[in-house]
Structures are given as structure tokens and as C-alpha cells.
Image (cartoon, rainbow, N blue to C red):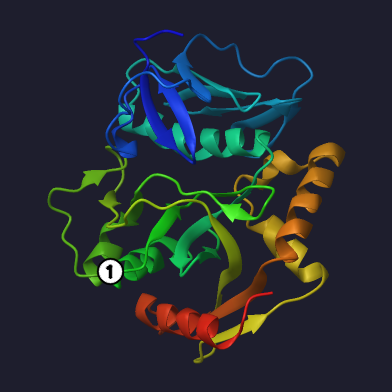
Amino acid sequence: MNAALTRYTCYGLVLASEIELPDLGEPLAGEPDPDVVVRFDRLAGPPAGADPLPYGLWREGTSAGVEIPDVGRYEARDGREVVIDPVDGADPKAIRLFLLGSLLGAVMMQRDHLVLHGNAFRIGDACAVVVGHSGAGKSTLAAELDRRGYDVLSDDVVPVDPDGMAIPGHPRIKLWGDALERLGVGTEGLERINDDHEKFQLALRRTEVEPLPLRWVYVLERHAGTELSIEPVHGATTFSLLHEHTYRNELVHGPGPMAQHLQQCARLVSVARVSRVRRPVETMTAEATADAILADINTVPAP
């Protein structure tokens, strides 16, 4: 193994990387054997026979990739390697952004994890995950929970292993400037996720967190009413919601991947309670949502 590669840890894995990854904190000491190698190389695009998917994604067997305009091509192989072919002059922050999001999400899928599009936080010896579409307020809610002293395990990408354990990710969350303003946090000194966005990286306060059993899943939704409510869901609806809020769920389409995905969802539903959080569009706040979710956890036990 090339000793020049810098080692980091993320999602319980050792990454040996040719690209610096300050988002993951300080590099690991020594040269532990890597689980995943991240390197630069030329990529010609999807191989012949690959399944073309939306948003520049593709999948073939145990490989998956994506092409991001003005950033570059990426390929994840066998859950053990990520190859990056950047566009000349691409913003290094943008290169890291897609590596640590879409590509590590694909790596965790290849390692038989159910990967949810959400944020996880500790509740005692277990954890809850809040999922939702982009812009639903997941990261703002995570920042509010962090402010209250709850350990946030992961932002945006939450891998769940076959034993139902949520795996901690990198200790930062991404927030728009107006969300930081509502939380009373200034943007001075915060790093932008890339040079073209008013979205910033906020370091988390958390201590070291081990994988934790996932017991509650909350789906953020909006409605035109005035009341905030939490409604448990059952049966086939739970599978529909988990699929809808699987990170890069385009990658689990097709008979083989979908069958595996349904098995992963079934394992999770057997140990976790899934609920909808219906929030009023005009008056919803992170504070009120946090209050409601924490009260629900204290009132209704997990399976």
C-alpha cells in the first residue's frame, strides 16, 4: 500500500486517500490497513452495459458512478475503492463534497448498508434518524439538537448496517446562511461547502460516538394546516417511506438491488418505529419540531 496516502476515518471505515479530506478531522496516526482507497485516475465514463440512471448516475454489478458537470467523474468499486477523475480547475471543495456524499453513500450500499437520507442523533443507548427531502429542514433540526446537547451522529447520509446499527459519519453539518441566522450562529469563520454556494460547514460538538441501534425514524413533511403532529405509520407504507428517503435511491432500482433493499428495510422495520412529522408550512420551527420529536420518543416506546 502506498504510504503517501493519508488515512482518515468515516462511517467506521479507514479511508486511504490521495486527496486531503479536512472535513473528516485530523488524519489518523500511523498507516492502518485501509477499508477504502480513494485515488485519482482517468475515467472514460460508464462502461458498456451499465444501467443509466437519473442525475448522471450509473450502476453495473458491484460498481457505480456519477458525472458531475464542472466537477468530474467518480466511480465506486466493490465497496473498497473510489476513483476520481476531476475536471481541470475544479473546486477542491466541490470534489470533496460529492466524494463524501454520493460516492461514500454508494460505497456503504456496496457494503450491504441501508443508506438513509437524513440525520441521526443519540437517545440514550440508541438513536433516532430524521429523514426528508432536500430543503425539509433536517440539518437545521440537527443543529438545534446539537445546541441542546444531543450527539448528532451524521448529517445527510446515515448508513444502517445489517444489524440495525446507525454508523456515525463526519462531525459537520451543512447549513444555509439564513438557517444559521435563525439559530443565532454567525457565518464568520465558517467554511463554505464550495465557492459557489451560501451554504456553510458547521462543526459538531459531539464526543466520540460508536454505532448505535436505530429505534426511531421520523419523516419530515409539510402541510397547509396550523398544527404540528406526529403520526406512526405501519405496513407497506413504512417500506414506501424508507425507499423514498433512501440516499440516492436511484442506485437500488432493478430486480437484484431492489430485492436486497426490501430485505434491508424489513430488518429495520422489525426494530424501529417509523412516524410522519407533519409540520405547518407557515409556522414550523426547528425548536417546535425538536420538542415534538423528543416528547414522542419519551412517550411512545420503540419496538
Is residue 135 visible to the viewer in this orientation of the structure?
A: no
Q: Which residue is mark 1?
A: 147
Q: Residue at x 38, y 30 (%)?
A: 8
Across and down, in percent, residue 202 comes to: 27, 53
Q: Residue at x 51, y 84 (%)?
A: 298
Vertical position of residue 10 compared to residue 34: above or below: below
Horizontal side of residue 178 vs 159, given as left or right: left
Q: Quadrant of residue 4?
A: top left
Given residues 197 and 148, the one toward you in this image is 148
Query: Label 1 amino acid?
Result: Arg
Task: Judge by depth and name the residue closer to the eye, 211 or 15.
Answer: 211
**In the visual, does 18 lie left or right of 136?**
left
Q: Residue furthest right?
A: 255
Q: Position of residue 195 (x, y in %)?
A: 27, 37
Question: Quick one: which residue is furthest to the bottom in this view?
Answer: 226
Q: Is residue 140 visible?
A: yes
Local packing at callout 1 (Cα closer than 10 Å; few below 14, some 14-19, many 20+) is few
In the picture, measured across the screen, residue 130 lies left or right of residue 3, that is right
| Residue 192 percent location from the top left of the image | 26, 44
- How far across and down, in percent of the image, does residue 240 sit? 75, 63
Disc 1, SS: helix
Residue at 42% across, 78% down: 290
Which residue is pictured at 41% across the width and 83% down the height?
A: 291
Q: Is residue 149 above or below residue 230?
A: above
* Picture mark count: 1
**Which corner quadrant of the image does residue 197 belong to?**
top left
Q: The C terminus appears in which quarter of the rendering?
A: bottom right
Q: Is residue 38 left or right of residue 180?
A: right
